[in-house]
Image: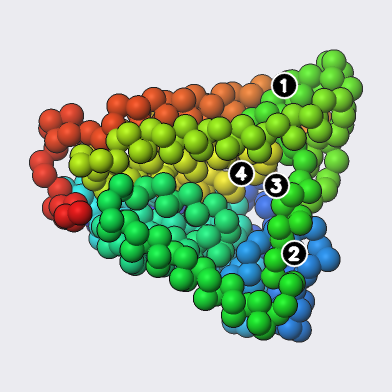
Amino acid sequence: MRLAAVWGCWLATRLIGLLIIVDRFPYPRREEILGDPAIYAEWARILASGAFPEGDVRWQYPPLAAPVMLLPHRLGGDYTTTFALVALAADLVIMWLLTRSRRDGSLGGAWFWTFGIVALGPMSYVRYDLIVTVAAVAALLFLHRARLFGVLAALGALLKAWPVLLLAALARTRRSLHSVAAFAVTCGTVLLVFALARGRAPWSFLDAQVGRGLECEALAATPFMLGRMDDRWGGTIVYQYGSMELVGPHVARVADVLPYLTVVALLAVALLAWRGSGRSWNTAWGCDVAFAAVLAAVATSRVLSPQYFLWLLGLGAVCLAHRRTRQRPAVLLILAATALSQFLYPINWPGLMAAETLETWTLAARNTLVLAATILSLTALAKGPASEPEAQGASPARTPAPAH
């Protein structure tokens, strides 16, 4: 009965989301969210001709993104509608994996994912990131199968680089070497195929990534955005590299520091993971580490586009599929931050661009929630893996962790 309820809620909310995309259900500023699929359609036409859009600084994706962008083009029909249907299929796969792989009969992950997409809004179905999240969720749910985890994590990294951070979930055992080897072989094989077929073009996305500035929604942009309200800062917002970036005093300096801050944050996650990944390692702990690593990277990034919350919603759902997770408080804060993101984009985006008080302070509140979630996440890792008694009285998992 509980399974039927969560599936029924998923179906109802997804139907409404799809109706919004095809303009059959009212939604404020619907046109705002349709800009990206228009860009995807443009790239798909270039890819269909046998080339990569390497001259476009907005192309910031690894080579395996090409077949994903091409798929709606090959399927035919209106590109945006077809892309939304492909994204809906990805959403369905994630939901099926979460309900199939639940621990102790828990549907916490499935419920979280269902309402997480509602919190982010229909934009979820017209963003490429939902497809990437499928590979990441599948990888973590098969963390106990070393080689399969490595292959799935590699496919995710070849779609968009961030799933490489999932390797932090691995235990300190020889068995983890099988995952690393599978990851390396998969990446090497795919990259070699594209290199032989396309030459240098598939790697041009790296140049665009390096050149990005400080996006207006990033955590580090918050003081500048607050300063815009009374002209204390003196800078402005311009469209470049596919997002709205800050230009003005001190921005470049902050943007230059952030990559080093990301390295420091990820080293902190790695240290905490190393301390807790000995004999007491379990799959719940591995998922906790992966969530913390991605959250730390997002919090210290130059860019925090709303679709990045899809990554955190997917990994958070996997964490909540385990009763022994320590990341529950951080995951719930991310859900709240996600809802504020939809309030900002697309619903009140003009107000944020105009430095209106309500929208600017909402951004500050959203980013504060992300920062608090990051701190809570790292604090939870410092406690190490949860033992059975600490897991709120949970009974042993239906699928035990594999021997190492």
Provide the residue designation for mark 3: 29
Instruction: Determine whether, in the image, residue 337 is placed left or right of residue 380.
Output: right
Asked whether the beta carbons under mark 4 and mark 2 sit within 8 Å of each other, the answer is: no
Instruction: Please determine whether, in this image, residue 52 is positioned above or below residue 115.
Output: below
Provide the residue designation for mark 2: 204
In this rendering, the label closer to the viewer, 3 or 2:
2
Distance between the alpha carbons at the discs numbered 1 and 2: 32 Å
In this rendering, the label closer to the viewer, 1 or 3:
1
Q: Residue flagged by tag 4: what amino acid is it?
A: Pro
Distance between the alpha carbons at the discs numbered 1 and 3: 27 Å
Q: Residue flagged by tag 1: what amino acid is it?
A: Pro
Dot 1 or dot 4: first in sequence order is 1
Residue 306 has which mark?
Answer: 4
Instruction: Determine whether, in the image, residue 186 is placed left or right of residue 263.
Output: left
In this rendering, the label closer to the viewer, 1 or 2:
2
Distance between the alpha carbons at the discs numbered 1 and 4: 19 Å
**Residue depicted at x 56% and y 32%:** 264
Q: Quadrant of the C terminus?
A: bottom left
**Residue depicted at x 39% and y 25%:** 379
Residue 177 has which mark?
Answer: none
**Figure quadrant of residue 226:** top right
The colour scheme is rainbow
Dot 3 or dot 2: first in sequence order is 3
Distance between the alpha carbons at the discs numbered 4 and 2: 24 Å
Dot 3 or dot 4: first in sequence order is 3
Instruction: Please determine whether, in this image, residue 120 is positioned above or below residue 4.
Output: above
Most extreme residue toward the left is 395
